[in-house]
Image (cartoon, rainbow, N blue to C red):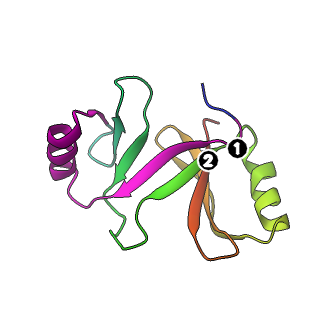
Amino acid sequence: MSTHHALDYVEIPFPDLAAAQAFYGSAFGWSFTEYGGAYVGFSSTGGDEDGGFDPTGTPHAGGPLVQVYSDDLEATAAAVRDAGGTITAPPFSFPGGRRFHFRDPAGNELGAWSRS
């Protein structure tokens, strides 16, 4: 069960999904859920997904995209703006729900997602 505004999901940019699965499966024993070659989710515990590999993302020194879960994506986007954050990608659909990306006032990029 996801908790409103709790850290919930980590997205790791990794252009080669097969290589991502090989590395993280071998190194840490993670399990995977493939979404039609466009995305791979991972679980570090064998339970709910903890994150996913984004083949369209560019690996960078900033690291993975940390996401919070939201019961109300639009209200969370408004709260981010009201608190001084900047929406960098407005709400969009992805396998498993909807999400948006934002930068905090220091420039860190994070995401917020919802199942609906």
Residue at 67% in and 33% down: 3
Left or right: residue 63 versus residue 55 is right
Residue at 43% in and 71% down: 62
Most extreme residue toward the right is: 82
Residue with the mark numbered 1: 5
- Which element type, helix, strand or loop, lies under badge 2? strand
Answer whether labels 2 and 1 touch (C-beta < 8 Å). yes
Which amino acid type is shown beneath numbered disc 1? His
Query: Quick one: 50 or 27, which is closer to the camera?
Result: 27
Residue with the mark numbered 2: 68
Horizontal and vertical percent position of residue 72 = 76, 42
Horizontal and vertical percent position of residue 87 = 68, 68
Looking at the rendering, the stretch of residues picked out in magenta corresponds to 4-33
- Which element type, helix, strand or loop, lies under badge 1? loop
Which amino acid type is shown beneath numbered disc 2? Val
Residue at 60% in and 24% down: 1
Horizontal and vertical percent position of residue 109 = 56, 67
Query: How many tags in the picture?
Result: 2
**First of labels 2, 1 by sequence position:** 1
Query: Quick one: 44 or 74, which is closer to the camera?
Result: 44
Left or right: residue 33 versus residue 19 is right
